[in-house]
Image: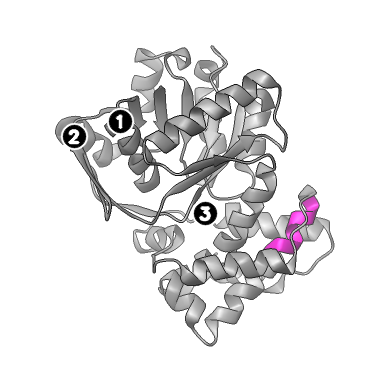
Amino acid sequence: MRFLIVGAGGIGCYYGARLQNAGHEVTFLARGAHLEAMQQKGLSVHHPDFHFASPVTALDEAGLAANTRVSDFDVLLVCLKTQDTQPWLERMLPWLQSAPTPLLSVQNGVDNEPDIAAMVGAERTIGGLAVRIGGHIEAPGVVTVNGPAQIVMGAWPDNMKGTDWGDFLSRLDETLNAADIPSRVSDDIAREIWRKLMINAGVNPLSALTHLDTRSLCRHPLYGPAVRGLMVEAAQAGKADGVTLTDEDVTEMFDIIFSFDAIKTSMLVDKEKGRPLELDGICGAVIRRCEALNLPAPMTRLVYGLLS
């Protein structure tokens, strides 16, 4: 298959490298020094179970628009930060509208799929999430990743849209698994995305405030209960989108992050590097929905305020 990796950060580069290593055509959309390094020296990806060092095809937005058509790709794998999704869609809309290539979002937050669907249509939108993966750019052209790096995906918002769509998802699922990217198709992807948001809402802001990794946070006598409290508020917020999450969901998600490898969250890495935080896409999403439900969300408001 032919893939465009939209947002060649740590996670996007890992998935792209796995796919290229399996023989698929992959183009990376990047910028700045990272783009220059990929164009001149290739891409290096370091993972405990996978090492990749090879020339790659990497373009910026201008090069993508001038030298390719969206029909050149079978799927666009969107790995942008949440705050970059809408601006990218707006800038690239004429290019995106020229063919019905589907977009698979594997981003943080619960607003990306609605934004993509509003711009290019729900029939082209595949909801998704990256599960149990930590990945960062260590230096231009060099990425370090850990974790099983799974992908869960499904037609947006929560049902298969006919036989053709189901066949495409099945083929994409087979392609990802064959490339050693553990994948599965969900028939309720909205709920899956909200369950992932619970984890992000619990550990991302606290890690940025404390500079602790996920394992240290969850096992800390004070911060561990705070992580769980933030996850409870995120679970309550899901009701605004018609997603019901129970105490059992909170416990399951907390146990996953509690037992997972110690990783630095993306929000902590962004804070250390002086980059914008995905604060609105994670905490803001919870606050807005709690407001709509007349729920207070005091812990989420606190960490949002401190990081703002």
The residue mark sitting in front, 3 or 2, is 2
Q: Are marks 3 and 1 in contact (CB under 8 Å)?
A: no
Q: Alpha carbon of mark 3 to alpha carbon of mark 1: how far?
A: 29 Å
Residues marked 2 and 1 touching at CB (< 8 Å) = yes
Occupied quadrant, residue 153: top right
Is disc 1 placed on a helix, strand or loop?
helix
Mark before the other along the chain sequence, 3 or 2? 2
Which residue is found at the position 69% from the left and 49% from the top? Answer: 191
Q: In the image, 50: left or right of 115?
A: left
Query: Residue at image x 47%, y 31%?
Result: 174
Provide residue 277's location: percent of width, then percent of height.
Answer: 48, 56
Determine if residue 90 is in view: no
Q: Which residue appears farthest toward the left when viewing the image?
A: 41
- Callout 3: 10 Å neighbours few (<14), some, many (20+)? many
What secondary structure is marked by label 2?
A: strand
**Residue 31 at x, y percent in the picture:** 32, 36
Q: Residue at x 59, y 64 (%)?
A: 253
Q: Is residue 91 left or right of residue 157?
A: left
Q: Hey, what amino acid is under mark 3?
A: Glu
Compute the Cα span from label 2 to label 1: 9 Å
- Magenta-colored span: 234-240
Q: Secondary structure under badge 3?
A: loop
Q: Is residue 47 above or below residue 70?
A: below
Q: Which residue is mark 2?
A: 54
> Which residue matches tag 1?
20
Q: Which mark is residue 278?
A: 3
**Position above or below: 109 against 198:** above
